[in-house]
Image (cartoon, rainbow, N blue to C red):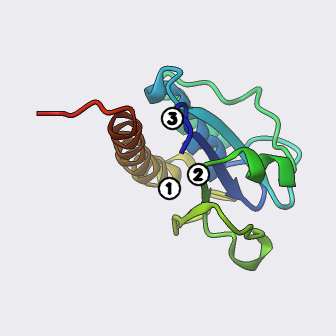
C-alpha cells in the first residue's frame, strides 16, 4: 500500500452509495487518503435523496457528476470497494477488493436513505482506521 492510500468506490450508477462513501471518506480522511468513485453504467446525476442525506451531515455532493469506471481508476487504487453491483463491476488482479452489500438508494425517499447513509458512514470510519493503521505500521510508527 502506498504512503497515501487510494480507495475507489464502485457501484453501477455512481449516483448514490459510491458518491456517499467517497464524500464521507474524503471528509474524515483530511487528505490522508486519495478517494475516487465510479460506476459501470453512470447515471446522469447524483441521487437526490443521497445528496439530501449527506447534506444533513453538512456534506454537499449535489454538484458531483457520476463517472465511468476506467482501468486507470482501478490501477491507481490500493483498495477497490464494490457496492452491490455484482457481475457488472470488473475485477482486476493484484488489488484488494471489498464488497459492501448495501441497499440501493435509487428510487427511495430520504427516510429510507438515511439508514443506508449511516451504514456507509460506519463502514467508512472503520476502513479509514484500518488504512491509517496500515500506513503507520508500514512507516514504523509503533503504537503503544
Quick check: 100 left or right of 140?
right
Q: Earlier in the sequence, mark 1 or mark 3?
A: 3
For the residues labelled 1 and 2, say whether their Cβ atoms are less than 8 Å apart.
yes
Q: Which residue is mark 2?
A: 109
Q: Residues within 10 Å of mark 1 (few under 14, many from 20)?
A: some
Q: Quadrant of the C terminus?
A: top left
Q: In the image shown, does 116 or 135 lie closer to the viewer? A: 135
Say if 101 sits above or below 74 in the image.
below
Say if 56 sits above or below 44 in the image.
above
Tell me if residue 57 can be seen.
no
Q: Earlier in the sequence, mark 2 or mark 3?
A: 3
Tell me if residue 5 can be seen.
yes
Residue placed farthest to the bottom in the image? 87
What residue is shown at x 70% (from left), y 59% (from top)?
11
x, y percent for residue 97: 58, 64
x, y percent for residue 74: 75, 53
Tell me how far mark 1 sits from mark 2, CA to CA.
6 Å
Q: How many marks?
A: 3
Q: Which residue is mark 1?
A: 112
What residue is shown at x 77% (from left), y 26% (from top)?
63
Quick check: 40 left or right of 61?
right
x, y percent for residue 64: 76, 31
Say if 13 sits above or below 87 in the image.
above
Asked which secondary structure carries label 2, the reply is loop
Which circle marks residue 24 in the picture?
3
Tell me how far mark 2 sits from mark 3, CA to CA.
20 Å
Quick check: 43 left or right of 16?
right
Amino acid at each position: 500500500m502506498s504512503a497515501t492510500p487510494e480507495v475507489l468506490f464502485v457501484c453501477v450508477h455512481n449516483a448514490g452509495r459510491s458518491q456517499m462513501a467517497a464524500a464521507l471518506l474524503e471528509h474524515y480522511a483530511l487528505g490522508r487518503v486519495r478517494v475516487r468513485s465510479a460506476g459501470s453504467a453512470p447515471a446522469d446525476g447524483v441521487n437526490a435523496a443521497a445528496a439530501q442525506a449527506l447534506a444533513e451531515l453538512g456534506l454537499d455532493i449535489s454538484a458531483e457528476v457520476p463517472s465511468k469506471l476506467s482501468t486507470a481508476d482501478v490501477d491507481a487504487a490500493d483498495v477497490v470497494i464494490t457496492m452491490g453491483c455484482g457481475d457488472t463491476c470488473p475485477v482486476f488482479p493484484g488489488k484488494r477488493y471489498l464488497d459492501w452489500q448495501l441497499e440501493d438508494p435509487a428510487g427511495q425517499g430520504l427516510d429510507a436513505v438515511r439508514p443506508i447513509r449511516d451504514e456507509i458512514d460506519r463502514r467508512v470510519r472503520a476502513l479509514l482506521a484500518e488504512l491509517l493503521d496500515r500506513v503507520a505500521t508500514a512507516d514504523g510508527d509503533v503504537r503503544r
